Image: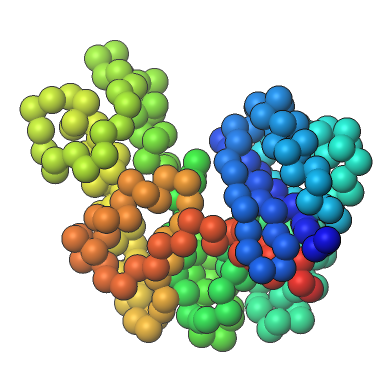
Amino acid sequence: MKETYLIADIGNTTIDLALYDGLGIEKVKITNQNQKQIEEQLTKWKGNNIQSCLISSVNKEGSENLILSLNQQEIPFEIITPKMMDDFANQYGYTITNTSYLGTDLFCDIIAKEEVPQIIIDLGTVGKILYLDCDKIFHGCAIFPDIRRIPQMLEQSTDLLENYGLSKNPPLVSLKTEECISSGAINGVACLVVSMVKQIKKKYDAFDSQIILTGGDSHYVSALLEEFGLEDVIYDPDLSIKGMIRLLNL
């Protein structure tokens, strides 16, 4: 039987769980707080000869729920640490000076692909744009409210606007309030991303950068970026998991 490894990418809203057997991955997405669903998925995978679990986490509750289930199933685990990140960076020639506080999810984004330079657009619970230059030097990132947070913010700060559900492909402008909010969130973030990427290219002379789009909410803008002027974007929803696989092979 093949040896397999469990990979857990714990975000602020969901956990991406993946089985990796050295060839490919089988992935599921679970809500952080759904302890029962975590237990059911681990039970389903119990016969896969899981050797251990590698955890990247930016959410304490999600980590606690997963670790509880791992202990119940007697699956050993390791949480990505700054030392692990430093060891990998040193071995593979990366210069990443903020590993003491850099989110492990962002580190895994940065190392997922060997090609450089890269500009990575990660639209999860929080939106991020990261820049890694041709010498594998990580210059940092920009952080902004993500698409689904915008309607929530409007509801919290106004009397008349509700937290409408997002409608995909909204018109640029509309007379309907729910479409107006969807446009501001989806088209607005798409414009922000396009403008920021263009400015990073200009500022750092990074015109040959590979542009990578990832993150749970990236599907909202994946078809818009080219329309708004950003060409040759690579859509990779499994980017962080691929970075974790590289860490497994350290």
Residue ID at (17%, 24%): 177
Residue 158 in percent (x, y) is at 30, 19
Residue ID at (87%, 37%): 73
Residue 141 in percent (x, y) is at 50, 61
Left or right of residue 33: residue 67: right
Of the 4 image quadrants, the one containing the N terminus is: bottom right
Inspect this view and state whether residue 143 appears.
Answer: no
Of residue 50 and residue 237, the one placed in the foreground of this image is: 50
Classify 89 as above or below 171. below
Classify 106 as above or below 133. above
Residue furthest to the front in view is 1
Of the 4 image quadrants, the one containing the C terminus is: bottom right
Residue furthest to the top in view is 159
Classify 38 as above or below 122. above
Inspect this view and state whether residue 83 appears.
Answer: yes
Of residue 38 and residue 247, the one placed in the foreground of this image is: 38
Classify 74 as above or below 246. above
Q: How is the image coloured?
A: rainbow
Of residue 221 and residue 138, the one placed in the foreground of this image is: 221
